[in-house]
Amino acid sequence: MADIQTYSHDAGWKNVVLRGLLYLVLILFALYYLFPLIVMISTSLKSLDEIREGSLVSLPRVITFDAWNYAWNEACVGVECTGIKLYFWNSVKMAIPAVLISTFLGAINGYALTKFRFKGANIVFALLLFGCFIPFQVVLLPMSQVLGKLGLASSTSGLVMVHVVYGLCFTTLFFRNYYVSIPDELVKAATIDGAGFFTIFWRIILPISTPIIVVSVIWQFTQIWNDFLFGASFASGANAPMTVALNNIVNTTTGVKQYNVDMAAALLTGLPTLLVYVLAGKYFVRGLTAGSVKG
Amino acid sequence: MASLTLDKVRKAFGPVEVLKEINLAIEDGEFLVLVGPSGCGKSTLLNLIAGLETSSGGEIRIGDRVINDVHPKDRNIAMVFQSYALYPNMTVRKNITFGLEIRGVSNAERDKAVDEVAKLLQIEPLLDRKPAQLSGGQRQRVAMGRALVRDPDIFLFDEPLSNLDAKLRVDMRTEIKKLHQRLGSTIVYVTHDQIEAMTLASRIAVMKGGILQQFDTPQNIYERPNNMFVAGFIGSPSMNFIDATLTEQNGQLAVSIERPGSPITLPLFEAPESYKAYAGKKVVFGIRPEGLTHKRSSSEQNGSQYVNFDSKVEVIEPTGADTMTVIEIGGKEIVARVRPDRAPTPGESMTFSADMSQISLFDPETELRI
Amino acid sequence: MGASQSTESNLTAGIQRHLSKIVVAPSFAASLFFVYGFILWTGYMAFSKSRMLPVWDWAGLRQYERLWQMERWHVAIENLFIFGGLFIVACLVIGCLLAVLLDQRIRAEGVLRTIFLYPMALSFIVTGTVWKWLLNPGLGLESAMHDLGWTSFKFDWLINSDMAIYTVVIAAVWQASGFVMAMFLAALRGVDQDIIRAAYMDGASLPRIYFGIIIPSIRPVFLSAIVVLAHLAVKSFDLVIALTGGGPGYSSDLPATFMYTMAFQRNQLGVGAASAMMMLATVMAIIVPYLYSELRGGKKNG
């Protein structure tokens, strides 16, 4: 940290002006980042008439939750007019198993690759890691065929499988890097105490993995909840996840354009990840750095 | 309790041999210290005994049982690690009883065992704490408790004191020694600290480059080191090595050291037979600092064989009890241990006495003791 | 006595040793099949005659030829360069600036950091939806400016084929620049304080300290940020779909949307596969040298 206060040669009023300027710039940037969110919230609380008459930036004169209600219960996705709630639950049913399975697999992979190293463990890890970087377009066509053959086309379980498979590389990376910094002596001590592979994992390694579990869960949840490409490619109709439904609502060309409903639906879609970020964001950063402390 | 035998034990990682045919045997109740510089293979050897690594050849026996292929948990050993390796998620009590729990020992017995050990190590107030809430010394005790509670055949210690500060290290050293005397258990202890090795061991194994250099009692290793490495490694300040020639005059062997002006000639009064073969040849003359002191009066000579010579003093380093006096002989800096009240000032010339009964001679080629 | 016991523990030891492999095997197999297998599959499809349905007849480079003859693909590539270039530069400049500003012992640093970073938690679809509304020529920013009295203000990029791709840049920078800020801030905090103190004692001014010492010393973070952003740019799909739908026409298409359209809407599986392989090649060209230097550097340090 090198800051003006400590390292400024100028004393007095010049310093005060500089700091004032500094805060001004930061606040302007904060407004830039907040502006779309504020507009989104205010628009979603307006009636359609008020939107047409008023201005984008004006706050709602009369606050109404009609748009929220409509988005949740009645909005039309394609020809179905059941609201976005159906798709919200689709996303929940997809995200929770996919997050849990990929996190668990990442944990046990990371453990095996660091604490019970076998010949070629590094190569296996490097090959797994490669999956993090491919553009998913390159797997779309074969995946849609395989899902069809497995009878998982257009189903939530199909999406769970896809997200587990392509999330594995990230979760394995997180856990491996975390476990590398845990001293091997812990495993040696437990081995001499008589514990085997799984006992050590369940009783000793997993209980001290909370920081990295948090990282993995947040990362995977955000990725999976926010995914659009896989959802749009592999799950159409009533099984689509929320992002696909939102895009459908917004881009429907029939009928009157209901901007307030669009904004309410967008907020509903963004809310879960936003909540996770606000509530647990600091644990994410802390967990990511926890591994490298001893490294 | 049991004896431990290593018979031609080898370990190689691919083409790299880290241990070459190690032969060691200790009796029940002995305290063996494996000592050597880092990378000498001492920790690998300990891991082989523990079963954390598999040997590439040879036999390891505890008592009469060959344990090469026995899983660590079935070897009936316990180990204390350098980083203590306490399970961070468990309380001290859980840490100590974990091994018993895995082995299916009943709750009541576990409680009894943990109470005994806690009492022995005076860690009763700590039993419900987590390792993160303990100081270094306390963690050390818990780590020992975890080993003690199992009542194993052999205790293995892997540099257990090197993470402690200097004062605590000395205290814990004493404590380990007391514990050994009380329990009479068989211990294998790895360290790179030669003082720890000298103070704790009933026998020391000095290692270097995967080869066992010497395996003997501390006193023998100190007084009769097998080679120049052992001689230099054990003892602080380390032994002085001076290039010299073994001369013979009228059947009297003497160590002759070249220097500008007059050479120093140090007669050997009780030379062993083995010296004779080196008469007239180059040797390395080894003498410990305490064998080289200020001039002794004849009344102080009781039994020792002092020979006097003069030398200019370069530097003095007082340590309190003694003053280390650095002189230069044959182009090398030599340390002599002088009583503080006899300490010279630098630049001054003074007379030193060499105790010829406590010297070692080495072959300059093989570096082995003559 | 040792014989039976040793075979038994050999067995358990053997299983113990293999457990590690057994546990990793399913993930490894999945990766071999779903990543490497699928890449080969797509790679082969790009050499086949596939159109509506995948067929295995060899067509050589036909699909690549068709791909590169398509005007739409050229637009997508050009857009990728415009979008990628502006997106990376803007994110780096804003991210670095914000990180330096936040590094000045700011009172409400935690709150500001949260505000700068929260867009990263949103789905690109949500981002696209809100910016589509903000940039809506009729009711968005344009009319807001008119209301404020700036009647000549015109902002119709969203429906202007020449400008539509820039709206994607605006929304993407809004979403990702906070993340770059976080990367830089972490790096700034990791700079050795003694170096800064030494420079200060030598009489260097604050800007000199930043430009001469701190920023050069966090150069590796610039590289990491560029790689992450470039990777993000090549994969960008959702944002374009939600914001412009690739339009007007196909004027704001990117390779990612191009591939999707060809494969799932135009029944051009072969061309879709060929474009996907081009994307893979682009990402590899960025990632592989980076990973190589990172891993090698890591070995040197470790």
Image: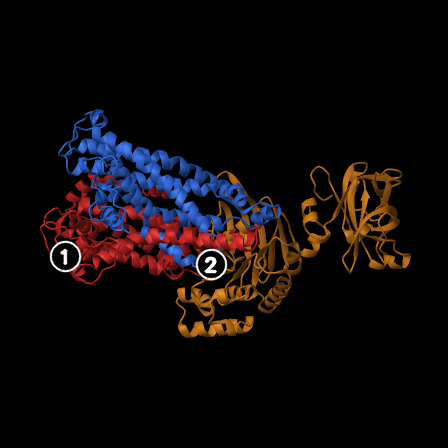
Chain colours: A red, B orange, C blue
Q: Nearer the viewer, mark 2 or mark 1?
A: 1
Q: Is label 2 in contact with label 1 (beta carbons under 8 Å)? A: no
Q: Quadrant of the N terminus of chain C?
A: bottom left
Q: In the image, what residue type sits under mark 1? A: Gly
Q: Amino acid at mark 2?
A: Ala
Which residue corresponds to mark 1? A83
Horizontally, is B217 left or right of A125 in the view?
Answer: right
Pointer 2 indicates a residue of which chain?
Answer: A
SS of the residue under disc 2: helix
- Disc 1: host chain: A
- Is residue C58 found left or right of B55 in the rendered image? left
| Image x and y of residue C62, in percent | 20, 25
For the residue carrying disc 2, how many other residues have a C-alpha within 10 Å: few (<14), some (14-19), or many (20+)? many
Which of the 4 quarters of the picture holds residue C54? top left
Please state which of residues C194 and C208 is positioned toward the viewer in this rendering: C208
Q: Where's residue C113, x and y in %?
A: 39, 54
Dot placed on the residue nearer the N-terminal end, 2 or 1: 1
Location of residue A69 by image quarter: bottom left
Residue C238 relative to residue C231: left or right: left
Is B368 or B78 nearer to us in this picture? B78
Q: Is residue B212 shown left or right of residue A196?
A: right
Depth check: give the residue in front, C236 or C61.
Answer: C236
* Front-lying residue, C119 or B174: C119
- Mark 2 sits on what residue? A189
Question: The residue tagged with tag 1: helix, strand or loop?
Answer: loop
Determine which of the numbered discs, if any, sits on residue A260 in the image: none
Where is residue C106 drawn, in percent x and y? 46, 56
